[in-house]
Amino acid sequence: MSAVTIIRSKTEQAILALFAKHKDQLQGQGSFGSQRAKAFASFEQTGLPHRRIEAWHYTDLRSLLREAPPLAAKPASHVVQRAAEKNWSTDQIDATRLMLVNGFYDESISSFTMPQGVKVTDVYKALSDPSSKNFHDHIGQATQSSDPLIELNTAFMNGGVVIEIASGTKLDKPLELRCLVEGIDPVSMHARILVIAGDDTEFTLIESHQGPDALSYQVNNVVELFLGNNAHVHHVRLNQSGNYAVDLSTLAAVVGAETSFNTFHMVNKPGIARHQVFVKMQGEGAHLSVNGVNMLNGTQHADTTLAIDHAAPACTSRELFKTILDAQATGVFQGKIMVKQIAQKTDGKMMSQAVLLSDDAKMNNKPELEIFADDVVCGHGATCGALDEDLLFYLMARGLPKAEAEALMLAAFAGEAIETVENEDLRAILEAVVGDWLGQRAHHVE
Amino acid sequence: MLEIKNLHVAIEDKKILNGLTLTVNDGEVAAIMGPNGSGKSTLSYVIAGKPDYDILDGEILLNGVNVLDMEAHERAAAGLFLAFQYPLEIPGVTTMTFLKSAMNAQRKSRGEDELPVAEFMKRVKAASDRLGIAQDMLRRGLNVGFSGGEKKRMEILQMALLEPQFCILDETDSGLDIDALKIVSEGVNVLRDSKRSFLVITHYQRLLNYFVPDTVHVMAHGQVVKTGGKELALELEASGYADYKTLAA
């Protein structure tokens, strides 16, 4: 019997070479080394996901990823200095800040003190420190699936941050995780972020991403969130990665009983993006809200993939995603609600709406329900279309030039999803990002 | 002054207006009446600049300038206003935001500065009070969940604030009860002056009791087939349109 020969793409070969080169230098050789090897072996089996894998049908990474840039190294001090001087859309928000540069946590440019009840650990250190028990106990536990992005992240992970929030902690200021890519050469990075929050916690976590334009760098971050019981957590991810960037991200969350978790995601810049949200509703009576706005132009490709697992009774989930597509952009929305047999009284609603502004833009909507309980209310919907011509005429007949009329309608379209963000200042920032995007678009149209 | 000369218009190869000619002088209120399908609403859309129509021939001159060369928003800035038969709902855009955007867009295209916020608020308050529009309605999405009467009042509010020179009212009376009709008519009456003209499209004479026209035109088969004074409207109410349906054919 002859062995099956796996045909590998150039990029896959390069990823294999990268792992061979780095595996002995990455942090956490002893205890963590075998986890890495296992994760990489799993990746080696499957290779990069491609269109014949259902979950990746519309985002064929094997053809989209043309190269595998070298792994980012821990940034030198002059890079960190430059990183400290960056402006961010969120600058006006009074927040406790944690800074990641090229995937590595840097304490020196993060907030000097953490609020009471918040403990921050550098993943770079935790990897080779067996006493970082919470890190080793939790890593990989928020997700059970063998997702190729998570496997790659586990194999290459060398940095990131663990945020522990003690039970009963209520933060009056948001925590902001700023992920910056800084440099002139393309690199790839696989940061891991763990948020471990106890019972009765209340906090807002902002995740901001930015990096240089015209640089084809690759990010594959994984955020694992462990939320205890009766917690109230808001999470906003603002993806302003560079225009040539490939930004892959996974948010895996486990939600406790009576906890409400609201996560919002916005993409407006990166060339290729996929945001995966895997949530397990593990405690009774939890409430989940997953929302987002993607604004795409040029040849951008952005994918939002959700898998909501109702694994306990009487949980509610709401998902609302808005996609605006212009030029030759491609949007993907895949949303799956799974209701386990035990999860009676589940109430789930999912909606994806897209506006196509050009004949060449493309939207792929794939909502799915998988229900094993009999006493549930679940629904999903997807719409896709051009702007309403009659409405456009109505606005123009009142004196608004076409570009301005379109901008007003699109801002309102995106606004419906932004309204799900509770923090007023954050809403204003997100609205401003939409406004800027629409302004630039109007400029092109004129 | 608005002059429509020999206007021929089709939509998807179907001819709607067949050489329509009409003049409305400054300060004049002209009513257009006519049976269903005579082209009244098409006329209003074509004047306002709706893009779905093929203009085969003719001119529409506003103070001597052919508006057919302009886009809808340019016509609005030049002083044309269409009060829609079915005002559209815009979820997510509050009436206040909409009013401000529209007023400032028109001012900008006329080379004027934006209206200071205090002045804007003052004007909105005065005009909405006159039309019996509650302030909380202005903070809701434009026309979203409004009744037919509220939507029509909203159109007149926009008309009052935008101060157009030429107003078209496309079946503004449809769907209004008698009280709403009075409020709307009063709202329009106060806007009458020697410079501002109106083209009032209606099926019924009822509106014209409250908003009295100077001239009445009867439209059939895409043409004006008869012109008279306000008494013509009363005649039509008595005799119906039967005579006119065959007249132009």
Image (spheres, coloured by chain):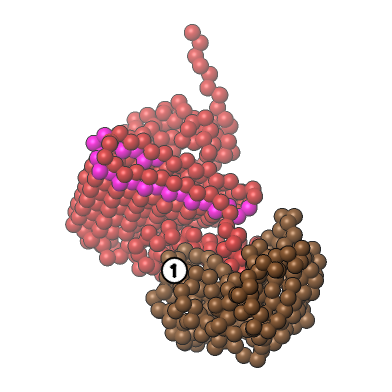
Residue A305, position as x, y percentages in the image: 44, 43
* Front in this rendered view, residue A427 or B242: B242
Side (left or right) of A392 relative to A263:
right
- Classify residue A337 by image quadrant: top left
Residue B111, position as x, y percentages in the image: 66, 82
Few, some or many C-alpha atoms within 10 Å of disc 1 (few <14, some 14-19, many ≥20)? some
Residue B123 lies in the magenta-colored region: no
User: In this picture, is B184 found above or below A101?
Assistant: below
* Front in this rendered view, residue A442 or A171: A442
Whether residue A89 is visible to the viewer of this picture, yes or no, is no
Whether residue B230 is visible to the viewer of this picture, yes or no, is yes
State the brown chain. Answer: B
Residue A346 lies in the magenta-colored region: yes
Residue A76, position as x, y percentages in the image: 46, 53
Q: Residue at x 30, y 52 (%)?
A: A261
Q: Residue at x 26, y 40 (%)?
A: A375
Q: Which residue is mark 1?
A: B146
State the red chain. Answer: A
Image quadrant containing the N terminus of chain B: bottom right
The disc labelled 1 sits on which kind of residue?
Phe
Looking at the magenta stretch, what is its main secondary structure?
strand
Q: Residue at x 43, y 49 (%)?
A: A351
Residue range highlighted in magenta: A336-358
Q: Residue at x 49, y 8 (%)?
A: A1
Q: Which residue is at the far bottom?
A: B194
- Classify residue B29 by image quadrant: bottom right
Side (left or right) of A7 relative to A147:
right
